[in-house]
Image (tube, rainbow, N blue to C red):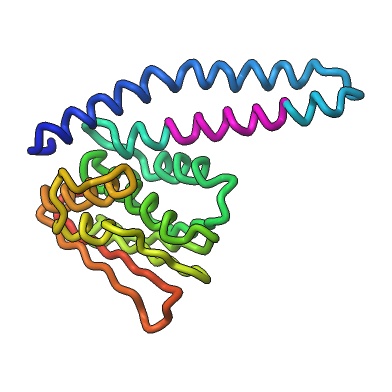
Amino acid sequence: MIADRSLQIAELLTSRFCHDMIAPIGAINTGLELLQETLPSHLTESDEVLKLILNSAETATARVSFYRVAFGSGTGKILVDTIKDLTNKYFNRSKLKINWKETTTKDLSINTWGRVLLNSILWLSECAPRGGILHVSFPDNIAVLTLRLKADSIILHQGTLEALEGKASLSEITPRTIPCYLIYTLVQEGKGILTINRTSSPSELVLEIRMEEI
């Protein structure tokens, strides 16, 4: 789906990695839950350690599940509810709160709106390291996707805007900016338009994307 061969190979490797990792991580998660249930109640320190491990395993599972769809190679449709679930689990322990506007749209194309939405949320979350509120809205039939970030402090990391606007070559892309480069590429392939605005308030950042294909 991506014209550039290097990026296509990276997508396939990521998809394979996530596919292979999610099962053992999920098994660790289940095993720790069972172990926690069998511990004597007086073993307070051990219980706290297990809770820490369990939380870490849950976080790892959430991240792998999120990355598998956001970065991996896939076709077909994905339910909006699935995207919400992946996102809510990923940011479960984050300072960022996500507000989803209700829509009657049930599913999205993975290789257009699905991956664009997940990568956009990931980028905006990194713009608000101290937390904030991200409002996600799209009308029925997905003509326009709008993500509005409100936070006390918004940081635009070096290279992210260049990647989003297609002003960076693939050789200049870093692990931090790869989601932005992927957003730009997917929007271009969907013959869409991407706009970024900082409102009169320095604490608000708006990303708006228009594409024809649902």
Residue situated in front as seen by the camera: 164 or 31: 164
Quarter holding the N terminus is: top left
Residue 21 located left or right of residue 114? right
Q: Residue at x 24, y 41 (%)?
A: 109
Q: Which residues are magenta?
A: 50-64
Q: Residue at x 79, y 15 (%)?
A: 38
Q: Residue at x 31, y 64 (%)?
A: 207
Does residue 190 lie above or below 13 as drawn? below
Q: Is residue 103 above or below residue 155?
A: above
Image height of 43 relative to 59, above or below: above
**Residue placed farthest to the bottom in the image?**
200
Magenta-highlighted stretch: main secondary structure? Answer: helix
Please identify the quarter of the rendering in which residue 15 is found: top left
Residue 46: percent from left, percent from top:
80, 24
Does residue 141 appear to the left or right of 191 in the view shown?
A: right
Q: Which residue, as the protein is rendered here, is positioned at the far right?
A: 42
Residue at (44%, 22%) from the top-left corner?
22
Horizontal side, residue 66 vs residue 182: left or right: right
**Residue 33: quarter of image:** top right
Q: Is residue 95 magenta?
A: no
Residue 42 position within the rendered picture, expressed as x and y whole percent measured from the top left:
91, 24
Q: Position of residue 99 (x, y in %)?
A: 49, 59
Percent coordinates x, y for residue 56 in the rendering: 59, 32
Q: Nearer the viewer, residue 186 or 180?
A: 180
Give the number of callouts.
Answer: 0
Query: Is 57 within the magenta?
Result: yes
